[in-house]
Image: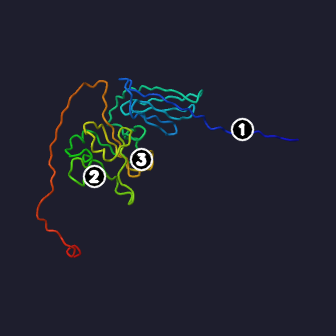
């Protein structure tokens, strides 16, 4: 007697390519930098026109998030290999002070287990500095800000929790509304346009950014108009002088230093 056993191999879940546009429900404007995250914690950010494209498992759930708006979920269909999902996010009434921006979304301060520090726009705007990056000096524990020159256009050198490497660079990764920017562009940002700055320090909060976040991450969120805001024109000006200290300093020579 011949017995034949037929086994059914478990198949991997089918993949579906989901694309669409993420807009604001109150203005119908596309949202740049909105995050689309799968259940496996992989995600993408929307382009300047609000469009996105992501591959997800059939039957799974996608989460759409944007700072200042209520997150929405959408179930991926199982009928076809492609799907279209256009999402209009509703404005969130919660205060921005209660949330911390971390990679693909936001978290409440009480639920963040990693080392994250947040600086609000009120502190930055009240700090008189020649460059925007120097305004963070003394605001965040573990963040060192050094200015090599007094030039207004010179970028400050930032390190988070000291120097992590001898051969490679020590500059953190800068993220502006979900888009990486160069360190030289950081000091060109207008402080009046900043809503909040989150400084991610340890591996638990920076791991989602990969190897580029080995020296920490500085996440910048800019201000956005709200539905109930009135038109407002604001003008600010600042004048400062930076000069080298002069004087006849009595310096030590080599022999005096050894003694």
Q: Position of residue 151 (x, y in %)?
A: 21, 50
Q: Say left or right for 97 vs 87.
A: left
Quarter holding the C terminus? bottom left
Q: Quadrant of residue 218?
A: top left
- Labelled disc at residue 206: 3
> Image check: 3 left or right of 30?
right
Q: Residue furthest right?
A: 1
User: What residue is shown with label 1?
Assistant: 8
Colour pattern of the rendering: rainbow
**Does 59 appear above or below 247?**
above
Residue 121 is situated, as x and y percent measured from the top left of the image, at: 27, 39
Q: Which residue is drawn at the image coordinates 15% and 43% (left, top)?
A: 239
Judge the density around disc 1: few (<14), some (14-19), many (≥20) Cα neighbours within 10 Å: few
Disc 2 element: strand
Corner quadrant of residue 111: top left
Q: Is residue 133 left or right of residue 14?
A: left
Local secondary structure at mark 1: loop
The earlier-in-sequence mark between 3 and 1 is 1
Location of residue 234 with respect to 205 vertically, above or below: above
Q: Residue at x 43, y 39 (%)?
A: 104
Disc 2: which residue: 145
Q: Give the CA separation, mark 1 to mark 2.
A: 61 Å
Give the numbered dot on residue 104. Answer: none
């Amino acid at each position: 007697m011949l017995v034949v056993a037929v086994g059914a191999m478990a198949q991997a879940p089918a993949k579906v390519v989901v694309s669409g546009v993420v807009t604001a429900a109150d203005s119908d404007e596309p949202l740049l930098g909105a995050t689309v995250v799968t259940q496996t914690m992989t995600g993408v950010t929307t382009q300047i026109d609000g469009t996105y494209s992501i591959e997800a498992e059939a039957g799974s759930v996608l989460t759409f998030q944007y700072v200042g708006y209520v997150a929405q979920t959408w179930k991926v269909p199982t009928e076809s290999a492609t799907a279209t999902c256009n999402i209009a996010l509703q404005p969130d009434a919660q205060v921005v002070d209660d949330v911390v921006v971390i990679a693909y979304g936001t978290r409440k301060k009480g639920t963040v287990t990693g080392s994250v520090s947040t600086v609000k726009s009120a502190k930055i705007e009240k700090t008189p500095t020649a460059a925007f990056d120097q305004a963070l000096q003394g605001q965040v524990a573990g963040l060192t800000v050094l200015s090599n020159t007094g030039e207004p256009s010179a970028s400050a050198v930032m390190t988070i929790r000291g120097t992590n490497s001898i051969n490679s660079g020590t500059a953190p990764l800068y993220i502006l509304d979900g888009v990486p920017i160069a360190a030289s562009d950081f000091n060109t940002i207008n402080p009046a346009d900043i809503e909040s700055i989150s400084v991610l320090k340890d591996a638990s909060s920076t791991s989602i950014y990969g190897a580029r976040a080995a020296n920490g991450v500085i996440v910048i969120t800019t201000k956005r108009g709200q539905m109930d805001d009135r038109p407002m024109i604001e003008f600010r000006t600042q004048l400062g002088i930076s000069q080298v200290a002069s004087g006849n300093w009595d310096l030590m020579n080599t022999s005096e230093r050894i003694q």
